[in-house]
Amino acid sequence: MNKKKYVVTIARQFGSMGRPIAMKLSEILGIEFYDRDIVDQAAEKLNLPVSIVDENEETAKELKNNYSRMQFPLGRQKSTEVQDKIFEAQKNIINFMAEKESCIIVGRCGDFILSEMENTMHIYISESIKFGYSIVLMN
């Protein structure tokens, strides 16, 4: 029987346990999950240090509302050539992974990038303030 391919994207707030939830879901479903792998592959593809890609992602985390994050995934300041290249590389990697196999994409604007793809489920994980502070303090 031919199983139909699907993709789950998980967007999450800091402290929401999004990564461990994605790992467990990946284990239950028997499919791969991708998170930091996307950053590592983008850095390699662009011949940039991972720290440069991370630095550009940190700029985006400073934005307060989710719409701004979708509109300006690498930050609100004037887009630079490097930021444009990083976003394009990550977008291409996410599209490649989604076309290749059923998988879970964590963060990296996966929900936005794959919004038009069939057979996708987009999940947003938020945290309660009390629970989130507990997780952050434990780490």
Image (spheres, grey):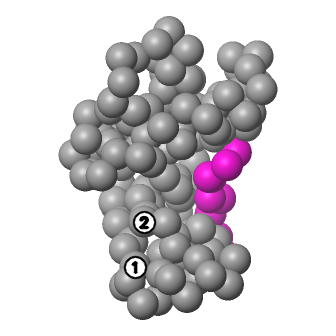
Q: Earlier in the sequence, mark 1 or mark 2?
A: 2
Q: From this view, report whether residue 123 is shown above or below residue 40.
A: below
Q: Residue at x 46, y 89 (%)?
A: 131
Q: Position of residue 46 (x, y in %)?
A: 69, 17
Residue sitting at the far left: 67
Q: Is residue 78 left or right of residue 8?
A: left
Q: Quadrant of residue 33?
A: bottom right
Q: Quadrant of the C terminus?
A: bottom right
Q: Residue at x 61, y 35 (%)?
A: 55
Q: Residue at x 70, y 45 (%)?
A: 37
Q: Quadrant of residue 47?
A: top right
Q: Is residue 113 left or right of residue 132?
A: left
Q: Position of residue 95 (x, y in %)?
A: 48, 34
Q: Type of residue at label 1?
A: Glu
Q: Which residues are magenta?
A: 26-37
Q: Nearer the viewer, residue 106 or 130?
A: 130
| Residues tagged 1 and 2 counted as in contact (Cβ below 8 A) | yes
Res 13 label: 2
Q: Type of residue at label 2?
A: Gln
> Element type at marker 1?
loop
> Element type at marker 2?
loop
Residue sitting at the far top: 81
**Count of labels in the image:** 2
Q: Position of residue 75 (x, y in %)?
A: 40, 33
Reading the image, the residue beneath label 1 is 127
Q: Nearer the viewer, residue 139 or 44?
A: 139
